[in-house]
Amino acid sequence: MEKLIVYGSLHCPDTQAALKKLTESKIEYAFKNISGELENLKEFLKLRDTNTLYERIRQEGRIGIPCFVQQKEKITLNLMEVLDANK
């Protein structure tokens, strides 16, 4: 299985809680801090602006983080989905 990618921001309490839970669950992940590096922000915006998962989030003016990418096609905003898939 490819390593989990987590897009988020260290300024976001939900991202911080998710990273803590992933670490506690011993799930390997690569964290892409969208508020710390422009390239990560560009990647996230491309994903967010083109994925139907984000339609409602865009309409509501929300950011939509943390975002979990398990495989190129498997994107979710649900931490429990990620934890269940990695048991």
Image (cartoon, rainbow, N blue to C red):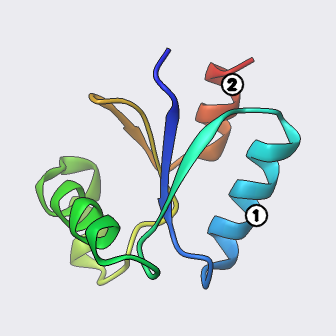
61, 20: nearer the viewer: 20
Displayed quadrant of residue 71: top left
Q: Amino acid at mark 1?
A: Ala
Residue 87 image position (x, y, % from top left) = 75, 17
Q: Residue at x 80, y 49 (%)?
A: 21
Q: Amino acid at mark 2?
A: Asp
Q: Is residue 59 above or below residue 7?
A: below
Residue 69 image position (x, y, % from top left) = 42, 39
Marks 1 & 2, CB-CB < 8 Å contact: no
25, 57: nearer the viewer: 25
Query: For the residue labelled by badge 1, is the local secondary structure a helix, a strand or a loop?
Result: helix
5, 56: nearer the viewer: 5
Furthest toward the right, the residue is 24
Q: Is residue 71 above or below residue 77?
A: above
Give the foreground label among 1 and 2: 1
Q: Which residue is mark 1?
A: 17
**Mark 1 nearby-residue class (10 Å; few <14, some 14–19, many ≥20):** some
Q: Residue at x 76, y 63 (%)?
A: 17
Residue 44 image position (x, y, % from top left) = 29, 62
Report the label total. Answer: 2
Query: For the residue labelled by badge 2, is the local secondary structure a helix, a strand or a loop?
Result: helix
Q: Is residue 39 above or below residue 3?
A: below
Residue 19 in the figure: left or right of residue 52: right
Q: Which mark is residue 84?
A: 2
Q: Residue at x 46, y 22 (%)?
A: 2
Alpha-carbon distance for marks 1 and 2? 17 Å
Q: Which mark is residue 27?
A: none
Q: Earlier in the sequence, mark 1 or mark 2?
A: 1
Residue 40 image position (x, y, % from top left) = 33, 65
